[in-house]
Every structure is written in structure tokens, then in C-alpha cells.
Amino acid sequence: MKIDILTLFPNSFTPLTESIIGRAQKNDKIEINVVDIREFSLDKHKKCDDYTFGGGEGLLMTPQPLFDCIESVLDDDAFVIYLSPKGKTLNQSVVQDLATNYKHLVLICGHYEGIDQRVIDTFVDMELSIGDYILTGGELPAMVLVDAVARLLPEVLGNDQSFKNETFKDNLLEFPQYTRPSEFRGLKVPEVLLSGNHQEVEKWRKQQSEELTKKRRPDLLKEK
Ligand code: 4GN
């Protein structure tokens, strides 16, 4: 998958060079291009923001640099996403859909009060929010989206290819997990997990998942 990230703050994206996402890029499982919107400004001072028509506090990102920047990365496969608190809330099924059905994502990161509506109306295929809170820019949401999508792509997770038993599979929270030792400071691992009885283990895990989800995230059960 190819992901273009359009931003006024390209230096924000160093975290994507680390760990699993860094390795996925080196191994050509994903190609991430961070594109500096400012370089497309035709203004003599490379200005990219201005006051809003109709009044009100704050600055808005102007259309010209964004139009030219977006057009420079567009192709027939491009799916353009604007990260915004007004968007559809991101969840694992949206992530799954993006990872499975798209080969080129274009992520637009807004700053200040956001971007001119004409950019959204002309290019944006989907507005996405990572949750009901406001951040100073769309850069962190873009990184959240990249991370969540990338780990579902073929061969990105190495050994710990563990999206079989995990949280949000079937809209259930994951069961508690334990590793060695079987007793630590007097704290014991549940007996059933040491029994070697695979059927009993599966039954226990399913029951734990259901109880936890009912208690903590009943909203997930309603979505089923
Ligand atoms: C996205 C962008 C939060 C989110 C953002 C979110 C950038 N804050 N919840 N800040 O996904 C328009 C107004 C773009 C806020 C600005």
C-alpha cells in the first residue's frame, strides 16, 4: 500500500520510522510519503493560511497550496481522507476496510481552524475522526490511522501475527492473558490455562471476553 501524508509539519512523522512500521517500509510492505503542503504555495512568503470569511477567531488553511499539493499525488487509485473531529469515528471495521480494499491512501492533515470547505468538496472521499476530542493538528490522527492500517497489511506483523484472538474481533474485548511464571509473588495464573485442555481454555476465554465486554463496552455488543 502507498500512503501520502499531506502536512504543514512534515517533521512530525519521525515516529513512523520506528519499530514495526519502520520495518514495513524498509521491507517495501508500505510506502509512506510525507509531502510538505507549504512547498506548493505560490505566495511569495509561502503563506498557507488566512482569516475566515464571515468573521470569527483563527486561521484557515487556504485552497491554493492544498489543491496543488493534492493534485500532485492524485492517481486513479487514490482515496482521499481528511482527519477531522467532524469525521466518522474510526473503528476497527473502518481500519479493516481501508487495509483490504485500497492501495493508495492520501491523508490530509489540517491545522489551525482547519481547511477551506472547497478542498473537502472537491477532493475528500472520507472525513475520519480518531475520537471525540480536538487536537492542534491532524498529524497525530494521521499516524494513528497509518499504524492501525499498516499492521493489518500482509507480512507487516512478523512473528506476533496475532490478529486471531484479539480485541474487537467479533466486537469483543480480549480475554486476560498470562505468561511465565505460573506463580509470581503469590499471584497465580488461572488454573484452567495450565490444564492443557484446549477446549476448556477456549470456553474460559470466550466467557471472559463476553463478561468484560458486557461490563465495560456494552455499546460493542449492540453493534453485533
Ligand atoms: C482531527 C484533527 C482532532 C481530530 C484535529 C480527530 C486539527 N483534532 N479527533 N485537529 O480525529 C480542523 C479542526 C482540523 C481541528 C484541526
Image: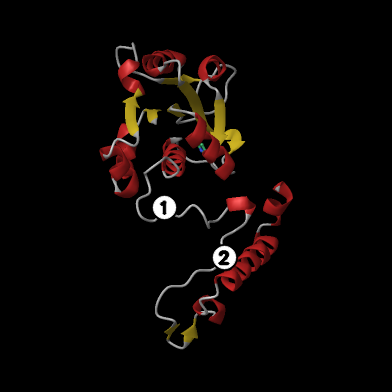
Q: Is residue 135 above or below residue 221?
A: above
Of residues 6 and 2, the one drawn nearer to the viewer in this rendering: 2
Name the residue: 61% across, 71% down.
Answer: 204
Q: In the displayed structure, does residue 14 sit left or right of residue 86?
A: left
Q: In the displayed structure, does residue 20 sit left or right of residue 61?
A: left
Q: Position of residue 26 (x, y in %)?
A: 26, 39
- What's the amino acid at mark 2? Phe
N-terminal-most mark, 1 or 2: 1
For the residue labelled by badge 2, is the local secondary structure a helix, a strand or a loop?
loop
Of residues 206 and 120, the one drawn nearer to the viewer in this rendering: 206
Q: Which residue is mark 1?
A: 161
Q: Which residue is mark 2?
A: 175
Of residues 30 and 80, the one drawn nearer to the viewer in this rendering: 30
Q: Residues within 10 Å of mark 1 (few under 14, many from 20)?
A: few
Q: Is residue 12 above or below residue 43?
A: below
Q: Residues within 10 Å of mark 2 (few under 14, many from 20)?
A: some
